[in-house]
Each structure stands twice: as structure tokens, then as C-alpha cells.
Amino acid sequence: MFDLRYHVWSLAAVFLALVIGILVGVGLSGSGVTKNADLKIAQRDRDKAIAQRDALKKQRDELRKTESAFSIAYPAVMRDLLRGKRVAVLFVGPVDGGIVRAIDKTLSDANAPPPLRMRSIIVPIDSQKLDDTLFSRGAQFIPYIGDDKVDLLARDLAAEFVGGGKTPLWNALGKNLVEERTGNVRQPADAVIVVRTAKPQRGETARFLHGLFSGLSISGAPSVGVEQTNENRSAVPIFKATGLSSVDDVDLDTGRAALALLLAGAEGGQYGVKGTASAILPPLPGA
């Protein structure tokens, strides 16, 4: 079923604004303070709020219809879509159990094995600790040392995360950079899922994450940023800015289908039910 909390809150905000506008307009009118021009402005704002409310209700009803129709198509869309695909998962911030369950269901429904590997990154980064660690590891890491090298470091970490095998940077920085890790580090990943559970970052950490996401986007493996419909601090803008596709409703059937399609190589873009999405689903193969 569609989780329409996002749209319910939007409707609630519109109704609240409408009620406040009416009460204020009536109060001022009764006091003799409001002039005809002010009343016209209040009536215009009221009409605008009503129109916005009606538009949101229409969108909600359309999404409910989509839900009902798509529940029938979902198994057929997902069947064998990711069979044999090795998918790696990267969290920026703590691992979120709800998103892990949504990812596991996506892979299971698409007949993919469980995630090949999963890592969660500690943010904000401590660049001085990273530099000290790299310096202590020898001359091969010198090119990555310095505030001006944080982008290069992040991009090469992304390449190692996708490629697997020998991962000297991850091995060197693990204690300072990785909060949690599971899975196979040797095999290459066919696709990557990115989740940002930490709040938006600034300064050197923001530059690091920009380099990391950009590195994933050019890795050659489909890389998709995901979040749930109730996420208030959406990461979709940064995913889009760094070239990653995104799904903003991975807790819904349509979101899981969009994720599976993107991991399978469908046309990239921003998908889901929020205002930042261009469509609910990527084009279906053969459609």
C-alpha cells in the first residue's frame, strides 16, 4: 500500500494555513482595521489555499489509483529483474533498519542475492586523523594527504568500493572512517545503493561526500541513492547534483520497483512521489 504520510502532512499544512487566514481575516474585518484591499488579499490567499488543497487531494487520489493498479503488476515487474546481480550498499551515517529491510525486500523480490557488502561511513570526517593515518602507512598514500586532496581520496574510495579486490584505502582508513561493515570485500559489485542517514554536512565533509557520490556515479556500475517517504532531510538534491539516480519512496512497492529497475540498468533520473521526482517509475523495458 502507498504510504501517503508525505501528502497527508502537506494537506494538513494547507488546511492550517486556510483556517488561520480565515480567522485572521474575520477578526480584522470585525475590528474595522481591515480595508477593502486587505480583504481582497485575504480572499485571494484563501482561494489559493483552497486550490492548493484540492490539487493535493487530486494527487493523493491519483496515487491511490496507481497503488491499486501497480500491486497487480509488481510481481511481474520484479521477477528475475536482478537475478545474479551483486549489489553493494553504502550508508553515510548509521545503518537504518527500516531501509535495510526495504533493500532486502527489493533484492529478494527481484531474485537477487543478499547485499554483496555493506559499509556505513562515520560523518563528519576528521581530515587530520585521515591524513595522519595515511602518512603513517607509507609513500603510496602521500598523494591523498591534504585538504585539497579530499575529493581525490573520496573518488578513489568509491572506485575501491565498487571494484572490490585489494582495497588499500579502505584498509588503511577503516578505523577512522567505517562504523560498520559486513559482507564480501573481494568481488566487484554490479550495482550500488547509497543511503544518507546523517544530516546534511558542511565544509570538508561535504566536499568528501560530493567526491564519493561523484565517484560512484562514474564507476560504470548503476548507483542509486534511496530514502523513505517520511525522510524530512531529503538527500535527493545532492544525489542529483553528483550524477546519482535516486528513489525517494523505497518503503513503497513503486519505490522498490523503481530501485530494481535502476539497478538493472534502466534510464537514470530522480523517481518517487516527492516534488523532486520526475516520475514514479523509470520507463519499463519494452514499454
Image (spheres, rainbow, N blue to C red):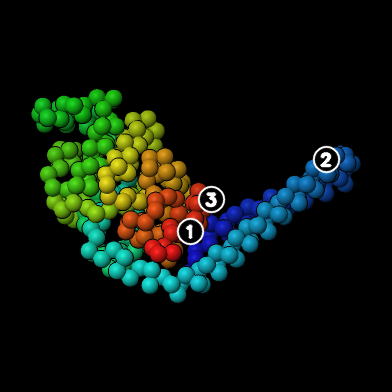
- Position above or below: 25 against 207: below
Instruction: Name the spot of residue 79 as percent of width and height, x first.
Output: 33, 70
What is the distance, in whole Å, between disc 1 and disc 3 at their CAs?
A: 11 Å
Task: Quickly name the residue at label 1.
Answer: 280
Q: What element carries label 1?
A: loop
Quarter of the image holding residue 182? Answer: bottom left
Task: Quickly name the residue at label 2.
Answer: 38
Q: Earlier in the sequence, mark 1 or mark 3?
A: 3
Circle 3: is it few (<14), some (14-19), or many (20+) Cα within 10 Å? few
Marks 1, 3: nearer the viewer = 1
Task: Quickly name the residue at label 3.
Answer: 275
Q: Which kind of residue does numbered mark 3 sit on?
A: Gly
Instruction: Name the spot of residue 78 as percent of width and height, x first.
Output: 35, 68
Labelled disc at residue 258: none
What is the distance, in whole Å, between disc 2 and disc 1 at their CAs?
A: 41 Å
What is the distance, in whole Å, between disc 3 and disc 2 at their CAs?
A: 32 Å
Q: Which residue is drawn at 24% across and 54% down?
A: 190
